[in-house]
Amino acid sequence: MQKILVIGGVAAGLKSAAKARRCDPQASITVLERGEIVSFGACGMPYYVGGDVPDIGALMKTPAGNMRNADYFKNVKDITVRTQTEAVAIDRRAKTVTVKTLTSGETEILPYDKLVIATGASPVKPALPGIELENIYTLWHPNDAKAIRQGLERGRFANAVIIGAGLIGMEMAEALTLWELPVTVVEMKEQVFPAFLDPEIAGIVAKYAAETGITLLTGERVQGFSGETGVTAVETDQRSIPADLVIMAVGARPNTELAKAAGLTIGITGAIAVDEEMRTSDPDIYAGGDCVENVNIISGKKVFAPMGSTANKHGRVIGENLCGSHMKFKGVLNTVVAQIHDLTVGKTGLSEREAKELGYEYVTAMVAGHDKPHYMPGAKLITVKLIVETKTGKVLGLQAVGEGEIAKRVDVAAAVLTLGGTVHDLFDIDLSYAPPYSSPIDNVAVAANAVMNKVAGKLKGISSLTAKKKMQNSPDKTIFLDVRTPEECKQICLADCPNVKYIPLGELRSHLEELNKEDEIIAFCKISLRGYEAEGILEGAGFKDVKVMEGGILAWPFPCEKGK
Amino acid sequence: MQKILVIGGVAAGLKSAAKARRCDPQASITVLERGEIVSFGACGMPYYVGGDVPDIGALMKTPAGNMRNADYFKNVKDITVRTQTEAVAIDRRAKTVTVKTLTSGETEILPYDKLVIATGASPVKPALPGIELENIYTLWHPNDAKAIRQGLERGRFANAVIIGAGLIGMEMAEALTLWELPVTVVEMKEQVFPAFLDPEIAGIVAKYAAETGITLLTGERVQGFSGETGVTAVETDQRSIPADLVIMAVGARPNTELAKAAGLTIGITGAIAVDEEMRTSDPDIYAGGDCVENVNIISGKKVFAPMGSTANKHGRVIGENLCGSHMKFKGVLNTVVAQIHDLTVGKTGLSEREAKELGYEYVTAMVAGHDKPHYMPGAKLITVKLIVETKTGKVLGLQAVGEGEIAKRVDVAAAVLTLGGTVHDLFDIDLSYAPPYSSPIDNVAVAANAVMNKVAGKLKGISSLTAKKKMQNSPDKTIFLDVRTPEECKQICLADCPNVKYIPLGELRSHLEELNKEDEIIAFCKISLRGYEAEGILEGAGFKDVKVMEGGILAWPFPCEKGK
């Protein structure tokens, strides 16, 4: 009868224990958790704080409503779960773990045949002046979430500041605006979601966030906090921001102290190194979840990418291998998806920035369009950016943003990426089509087509950011050709550009003499579908340098003037 | 300057014309359409009839609101579109088409260098007695949709009968129930969606359809129609059904007369045969859209699978190849998705029935679960059935049904199928995870895990249909172990089974003596997640023959008794 010891009672730890029990009904399986609770759905906390989830207890229950506590695991899975029990040292030679019962302070020595380290990650709380003030939270323990929610319910907060415009930061920004609290997000880097979005997609997110009452301050560094007992202001390198609620969301660090002390190999990302079978440098010790590093399937590089979904996969692989299997974990795509009110943004694989840094030669296309036929109620515009390796056609990554269905497109791309598929594969997929769900040519296929058109020289694109720079730097050399209707231009126009020429698409063919065949012409419309038609008309008429502004006005991430 | 002639002005025809224009700005391109309109979004008709789409004109417009008529195509794409113009004969030696202008009756001869046949398909209208009566429609031409909608708006109909429980039949059933009309669907085969669903998934659809007021009569054959001028009843082999509105939705036939008369090869499905480049047996003639046959990527078999999404892909491939490319169309997966009120059902690849007919050795798993974490508002239960080749692990097909997000799961599977992926690939995919969109272990990954568990002998499943047969045929030999709570059993129970044993999961370990280790035990709960736990407990305790009823009560497609 093998003795399995698991350190850490959340996703990876409990999943590996449960899976091991399934393969080995005789094993003795013990899970050690230093906190009071186990198997907690931490990713749900922003939705509890925002109020969508009424009771935090729901995050600890099974779908059938059972509390996932020690009794439950004993009774249903025959797994011993010991909460408030900390593993303080691993003796790899003796194959024992020194364990401390936190309530009594007593220690004991537990033997193992196989050990699983699933110690998770902890939020970074930098040692800034004033960091100890009250009402400065991280979102890590349910008690944090409960305290924030209680404060919100009692109307205690008037101004919230969030430090960090990553996933948790923006999820919390959404949550707090649901309480009609003024929310400011301060981000050190130049854009929202700096870790995974390209700037033109980030621009769309930022524009939307501003519309929903989130003040986003990018390129701004927090230097400390003011206040007597409770925080009253966040001090940045540019200003003092009144704040009586602060959420620190500047990332997480893997909890590796125990592994390090035991002499296990730590990877270049600072997380525990594991092989494909989730084994550490000690063959009797596995590790999984937020404390280990992963491999990015596309780049082959090691990454630190803590995600609940990945932790669960780790758990399954570890559980199988605890029973003698040799199941492999392939790696991650750094896939993310986030909701900000009605907007969704997602990414899988590499961003353009990452592709560039890794030295790929690539083509990108950014296309905007409805997420289902425009005539269907509820059809929404979404923008998809696809990155493809030029030489091989291999898909490198996809980003998508908009008020329509985003997760589906990200997941289709994730499937293609996992299998090493090409842009032609993306075109080929027989995606489900019916008007309530999608258009006959799905947005990802449109993006694939645009990339293929670019490779074939049939589409020359320019990003909105590059176009904007041209507007500012060389207004005389470039014509911005707006082929929308006059009515559309009344709603939103590119007010700050001196060189915009309006010719609605239907009149373009008969007004060609108003344009110069030698000029650089950047055509666009609301989503640049008509911009693409305009490119065809102009090129067919012998114009030399015509480009399409990709994603059109929808991807123009700058303030627009109304009614000009 | 090459002359391109296209016969048929809907999806495939116009797409190939537009694509050809893009590659060849000099070509003369003419599209012949015998109807009055072109580029019509026919798939939107049920949503116009149902009222979701207020104006049928929207189905003929671009997203920017332009009517896609002859002027539009001339003006924007420099394509000549001739409506009410029928191609009556092809002379392949002379490379000409005889064309008849329907308004004047005049004929003329048009030369071509390359010809595209995109004549579409027509609905089957069998020669049953009374088929000529008024108010018996097919849903093919917008005039049909307009007439039906007008009749509905004026309250002219009291009883609708739909013949055929396929995609159009069920979409129309939904549309008519939106007008609060009693709707009966008569289907010759034994189930709803007989062409693509396995019976246990069809059972879930049928149960839901019944709850939304659709009377579904399966295994029943229509023999004719009664009435004087307008239809008053549908006569089947079992009854007379009052009806003042009848929709015939018994399938479509490819329009191949022209191709046949020209001596082009017709495939075994009865549709026009084309090669991978969408070329017919004449190298100067391409064909695409609903008039051609496709290859199913998984089976390699020819299939007739008319879909707007496929037609658009054909158009792109043809357009490229008209300009000298050699682009290939890979084939189809017979992917479908359909909405019936809040329920969605979809399928991609092979059904179990198809896999069996094709001689595959396969494993299936059917799993039910929430489409996002159960604690999130709007989380809904969905059921996924996965079919995998035993020997290779290759995914053969997936079906999904429920009130939650279905299309995403179908599309992920479609991507895996297109790339020839395995069940392990399905587990590997780093799908996007955030609580508003999905659970950390997505439903398709749960299905993949269940298949792997079955292959490894760690899960023994039984379908609800087989379980039901056991209930009826051998009630003494099988124990049905319901591990739900007593409260859940009060809501819905398996009333017609004499051999149900209730032991809530939490009490199972302490009540093992109530069960016999030698009996066949079929464990289940609402979704059989606890059923699976019960299997683990019983097998761990030495029980010999334990199975899980896959999909649980949710997949029990029989009427249930309340409050027993």
Image (cartoon, coloured by chain):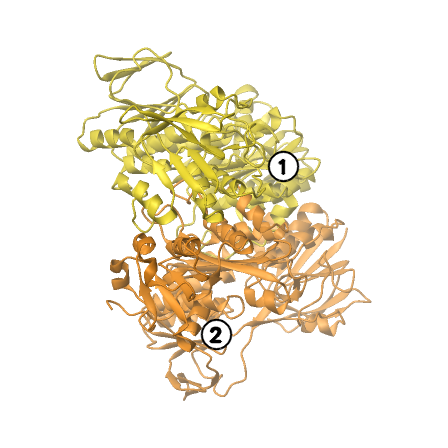
Chain colours: A yellow, B orange
Q: Position of residue B515 (x, y in %)?
A: 35, 63
Q: Position of residue B266 (x, y in %)?
A: 71, 70
Q: Is residue B242 left or right of residue A423?
A: left
**Are dots 2 and 1 on a single chain?**
no
Q: Is residue A272 left or right of residue A85?
A: right
What chain letter is assigned to the residue under label 2?
B
A80 or B446: nearer the viewer: A80
Badge count: 2
Q: Position of residue B385 (x, y in %)?
A: 49, 59
Mark 2: which secondary structure? loop
Residue A368 in view here: no
What chain letter is assigned to the residue under label 1?
A
User: Which residue does the numbered mark 2 point to in the structure image?
Assistant: B164
A287 or B420: nearer the viewer: A287
Residue B9 in view here: yes
Q: Amino acid at mark 2?
A: Gly
- Using the image, determine if residue B16 lies above or below residue A125: below
Q: Amino acid at mark 1?
A: Val
- Using the image, determine if residue A15 lies above or below residue A126: below
Query: Looking at this rendering, what residue extends furthest in the left direction?
Result: A154
